[in-house]
C-alpha cells in the first residue's frame, strides 16, 4: 500500500493561512489521488482531518453503504464531514491555503502547526493540543493494552508480537 502518511512534521502557518504540506505527505497525496487534499474539521478533536480524494471517496461510499442515502444518520454524517470540507491544491512551493473556517474550527493561528500522519489520513493540529492528544493516546494504549492485530508479512508469513 503506497502513499501512507507517517510521522509528525512541524511547519509554520503564515498570516494568510498558508502552510507547506510536508513533502512526504504531498507525495502520498499524488500517489493516492489527484494531487489535492480534502480537509475538514475533526468530529472528535480540535484539529483538521486531511486525506486524498481516493480515501474521502471510499469513506463516502462506506457511509452510503452503511446508512440509507436519505436517512438521518447519513445526512448527519455527510453534513459533519462533506458539508464542512474544502478541497485544497498546493502551489508551486507546496503550500496550501487553509480557509478561515477551517482555521477557526481547529483553533489554528499564525505560527507553528503540526501534521500528524495516521496511515491513510493525516491531521493538522496546534502543537500544544497535539502534545496533549498524543499523551492521551499513549495512556489509552497502555491502560487498555491495545495492540495491532497480527498481519501477514509481504512474504506471506504471519508476524507475531
Image: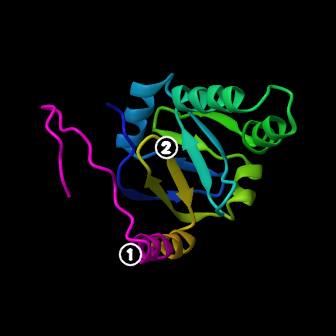
Which label was assigned to residue 142? Answer: 1
Range of the magenta residues? 135-161
Which label was assigned to residue 121? Answer: 2
User: Would residue 91 be found to the left or right of residue 75 on screen?
Assistant: left
Q: Residue at x 57, y 72 (%)?
A: 129
The picture places residue 74, in percent across and down from the top left corner, at 79, 35
Q: Residue at x 48, y 74 (%)?
A: 131
Most common secondary structure along the magenta stretch: loop
Q: Quadrant of the C terminus?
A: bottom left
Sequence-first tag of 1 and 2: 2
User: Would residue 60 be found to the left or right of residue 93 on screen?
Assistant: right
Quarter of the figure with residue 14:
bottom right
Q: Quadrant of the N terminus?
A: top left
Whether the magenta-drawn stretch holds residue 153 is answered as yes
Q: Residues within 10 Å of mark 2 (few under 14, many from 20)?
A: many
The picture places residue 67, in percent across and down from the top left corner, at 75, 32
Q: Is residue 41 positioned above or below 55 on the image? A: below
Amino acid at each position: 500500500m503506497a502513499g501512507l502518511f507517517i510521522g509528525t512534521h512541524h511547519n509554520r502557518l503564515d498570516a494568510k493561512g498558508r502552510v507547506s504540506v510536508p513533502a512526504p505527505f504531498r507525495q502520498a497525496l499524488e500517489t493516492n489521488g489527484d494531487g489535492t487534499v480534502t480537509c475538514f474539521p475533526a468530529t472528535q478533536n480540535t484539529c483538521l482531518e486531511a486525506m486524498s480524494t481516493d480515501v474521502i471517496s471510499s469513506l463516502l461510499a462506506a457511509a452510503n453503504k452503511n446508512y440509507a442515502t436519505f436517512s438521518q444518520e447519513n445526512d448527519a454524517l455527510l453534513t459533519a464531514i462533506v458539508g464542512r470540507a474544502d478541497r485544497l491544491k498546493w502551489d508551486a512551493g507546496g503550500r496550501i491555503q487553509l480557509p478561515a473556517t477551517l482555521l477557526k474550527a481547529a483553533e489554528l493561528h499564525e505560527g507553528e502547526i503540526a501534521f500528524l500522519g495516521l496511515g491513510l489520513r493525516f491531521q493538522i493540529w496546534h502543537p500544544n493540543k497535539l502534545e496533549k492528544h498524543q499523551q492521551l493516546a499513549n495512556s489509552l494504549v497502555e491502560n487498555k493494552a491495545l495492540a495491532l492485530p497480527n498481519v501477514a508479512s509481504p512474504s506471506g508469513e504471519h508476524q507475531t508480537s
